[in-house]
Amino acid sequence: MLVGAAVGIFVDRQLVQGRLERMSQDPRTVRQTFFTDLKFTSQQRTAWDSVWSARMRADSALMAPIMPQRDSLRKATNERLRALLTPEQLKLYDERQQHRPRPGDGRR
């Protein structure tokens, strides 16, 4: 059982680390790597970008009506979480938040 737990933790750490690394990459670079890895033609790249852009516009239109409530929820939650931290923890938390991708940074 102990070995299973250790393997589970190891696998989780590997998957989470890989995902975090991918999330921190420039989205344009990730897209170009994807296209290259799948050996897309220029026509496929153009079509893919067109479909993806249409999806993102539709997503933005769907989200627009609830964005004020979502932002309010995010702000209230952040205030409550920050209140749980000591001054030392808050300093470390703020430093880490500065390096975190933000909405609108090209990832969405």
Image: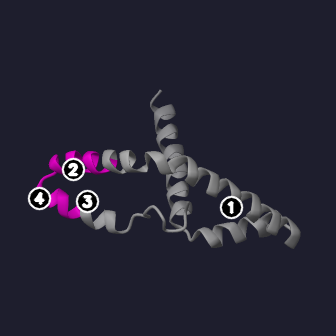
Element type at mark 4: helix
- Whichever of callouts 4 and 1 sits on the residue coming sooner in the sequence is 1
Q: Residue 95 vs residue 26: left or right? A: left
| Amino acid type for the residue under numbered disc 3 | Tyr
Query: Mark 3 falls on what kind of element?
Result: helix
* Mark 1 lies on residue: 53
SS of the residue at dot 1?
A: helix
Label 4 close to label 3 by CB (< 8 Å): no
Q: What stretch is highlighted in magenta?
A: 74-92
Q: Which mark is residue 79?
A: 2
For the image, the number of numbered tags is: 4
Q: How far apart are marks 1 and 2 (CA)?
A: 34 Å
Tell me where residue 49 appears, x and y as whole percent: 74, 65
Give the label, 2 or 3, closer to the camera. Answer: 2
Vertical arrangement, residue 70 with respect to residue 42, above or below = above
- The reply, left or right, for residue 73 in relation to residue 64 is left
